[in-house]
Image (spheres, grey):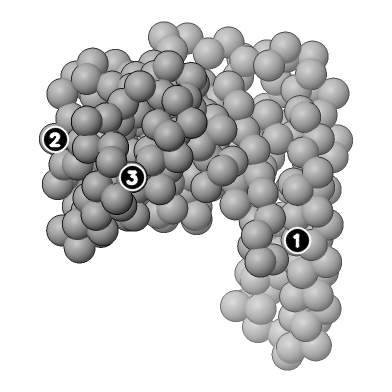
Amino acid sequence: MKAVAAMVTPGNVLADIGTDHGYVPISLVQRKKIPKAIAMDVNNGPLQRACEHISMCQLEEYIETRLSDGVKKLKVGEVDSILIAGMGGELVIRIISEGMEVCRNAKELILQPQSELEKVRQFLREKKFKIIDEDMVIEDGKYYPMMKVVPVEVDEFWDMIPPEALRPCDMYGPVLLKNGNPSLRKFLVKQHKQLNKILKELDKQPDSEAISNRKKEVLEEISLNESAYTILGAIKNAGI
């Protein structure tokens, strides 16, 4: 939560999508990092909990609650920052897709997809959202990547890197790779060990088309994992 909150630009008005308990907007307002926020959720239960916490902190004047599926109850230009955290990648993509006008008119999106990161980054690239910051934290043995993106008309970065660097960037994050994020490094080591373990187990299985196809998939994943270490120079040369 702290790492996600840290990505919100000071002074911005925030919409927290899927706010749950409302902890992020409460923390940001209490620390006077943002002037006000809209805490939003598709379910009444979490929104009621957020209302109770906001009331306990006497922040009703600064944090509004709103029942909404994604950003559907947000007006264009109503907020500066949109936070979408703690949900699956497909849902993140759906929320942005269905609220594209609202999202492209915000100054920034703070995203923390919990799955399908490659799909999310590919979607952002295709819809012209530029990743300007990324972080990854480890909590209870789990890895949580997050990113700040801004709407752009043109993102020349992708024209400047070699084609072979494209998919590793989508998988692991261009800014995480560029910065040599220590949590990402740990993740890559752990993933490499897991993939090789899977490959050894597959080698013990009787030959079949399914086993052969799975081996090819794992070998490709290992290759992409290893390539993450080699594309750093290309990313730096691109000037991201």
Q: Are marks 1 and 2 in contact (CB under 8 Å)?
A: no
> 158 above or below 42?
above
Report the quarter where the C terminus lies: top right
Q: Secondary structure at mark 3?
A: loop
**Badge 2 density bin: few <14, some 14–19, many ≥20, Cα 10 Å:** few
Percent of width and height locating residue 68: 16, 44
Q: Is residue 104 left or right of residue 98?
A: right
Residue 57: assigned label = 3
Q: Nearer the viewer, residue 220 or 41?
A: 41
For disc 1, the marked residue is 191
> 79 above or below 59?
above
Q: Residue at x 62, y 33 (%)?
A: 134
Choose the circle earlier in sequence order: 1 or 3. 3
Percent of width and height locating residue 153: 41, 9
Q: Secondary structure at mark 2?
A: loop
Residue 21: assigned label = none
Choose the circle earlier in sequence order: 2 or 3. 3
Percent of width and height locating residue 156: 58, 10
Task: Inspect the image, locate mark 1, and give the three-letter code of the amino acid beneath it.
Answer: Gln
- Note whether residue 50 is visible: no
Q: CA distance from mark 1 to mark 2?
A: 40 Å
> 90 above or below 130?
below
